[in-house]
Image (spheres, rainbow, N blue to C red):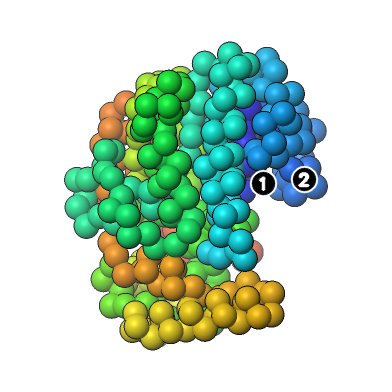
Amino acid sequence: MLLLTGATGYLGSAIARELIARRLPFRVLVRQANRLGFDPATGQCEVVLGDLRDREALRPALQGVDAVIHTAALVKMWVRDRNDFFRVNVEGLQNLLQAAEEAGVQRIVYTSSFLALGPSADVNAGEGLHHNGLYSDTYAESKTRALDWLRGEEGRRFPVIVMFPGVIYGPGPRTEGNLVGGMIDQYLAGNFPGLLGSGNQRWSFAFISDVVNAHLAAIEKGKPGEEYVLGGDNRSLNDFFHTLADFTHVQRRVRHLPIAIGKIVGATEVMRARAFGHSPQLTPGVVEIFKHDWVYSSARAVRELGYWVSPLEEGLMKTLAERRPPVIRQWPSTASR
């Protein structure tokens, strides 16, 4: 039996749908069953209610489980109590691993984040990178602390396979974990506020189906104690929007906003959020992310997990085909891969 956490999130829900498509039995641990974006009755899926912060509640979910895919995390640009990030993303991971050890689980695939590796302008960089400690936001800090703990003496005793997805995009719900989907929607609607910085910053665009398949492959082929970068097509943000415009035939001018102005706007938004209780539209942490390159090599995952890196053009074609009506032109099948 496989246990999946985070099935209400962007990546976790995609993994759940793939498990259903493959007719594989699995169990999901969720806090609220009504937030599932799929019908568990359509597949061999059990639902267990529980919270990562409550170790006792994890025991029923882990009974009879051989492997775990742990995608659950608090993924937000801001919350009022920053310690919530550490309670879920660090302590929640520790609770799950300790409960899994007691249950005799043999393999845990853990979804970390490229943010935990830190900025990278080197397309050959990958596993083994260490964050320099200048965190963009509390989410990044919490994921880095979780990784540091796993790499330490206590964490190394658990049979964990660590995955580092790049900037995930593709079809699926517009959650906070689907940043690119939101950018696409805003661009097509004509209300994209603009790019922070020059737009020459490069991201590792990882198509969601590729990332899902790699997580499932890690259950069979991954080596406990190893790390795998699931990067993608390393492209600039300017290139992304040029490609989007070309595919959709929607030509819009993308404004460029200075980083310094973005920091001021982000700080103002956070102050308004604290005063009025709403979520900020921008934070200084998000602006900091846009300052840097985030490109990596997926060579180990390709070699050991059979990871496939979809070209941005192919991934965008599939992403846009989800919209009704589709807003794409044909992508040449002869394009290089």
The alpha-carbon separation of the residues under discs 2 and 1 comes to: 9 Å
- Residue at image location 61% in from the left, 61% down from the top: 81
Q: First in sequence, mark 2 or 1: give its number.
A: 1
Total labels drawn: 2
Observer able to see residue 21: no
Front position in the image: 241 or 141: 141
| Apparent side of residue 172 relative to residue 150 in the rendered image (left or right) | right
x then y, percent, for residue 260: 34, 83
Residue drawn at point x = 51 percent, y = 26 percent: 108
- Label 1 neighbourhood size at 10 Å, few (<14), some (14-19), many (20+)? many
Q: Nearer the viewer, residue 154 or 6?
A: 154
In the image, 287 versus 293, the foreground residue is 287
Q: Are marks 2 and 1 in contact (CB under 8 Å)?
A: yes
The three-letter amino acid code for the residue at tag 2 is Gln
- Counting other residues with Cα less than 10 Å from the Cα at mark 2, is it few (<14), some (14-19), or many (20 or more)? few
* Placement of 330 over or under 43, stated as above or below: below
Q: In terms of depth relative to the viewer, which is nearer, 195 or 74?
A: 74
* 252 lies above or below 171: below
* Image location (x, y in percent) of residue 3: 63, 27
Give the quadrant of residue 308.
top left
Answer yes or no: is residue 120 visible: yes
Q: Quadrant of residue 78?
A: bottom right
Q: Which residue is mark 1?
A: 8
Which residue corresponds to the image point at 42% horizontal and 45% vertical from the top-left?
A: 145
Specify the amino acid type for callout 1.
Answer: Thr
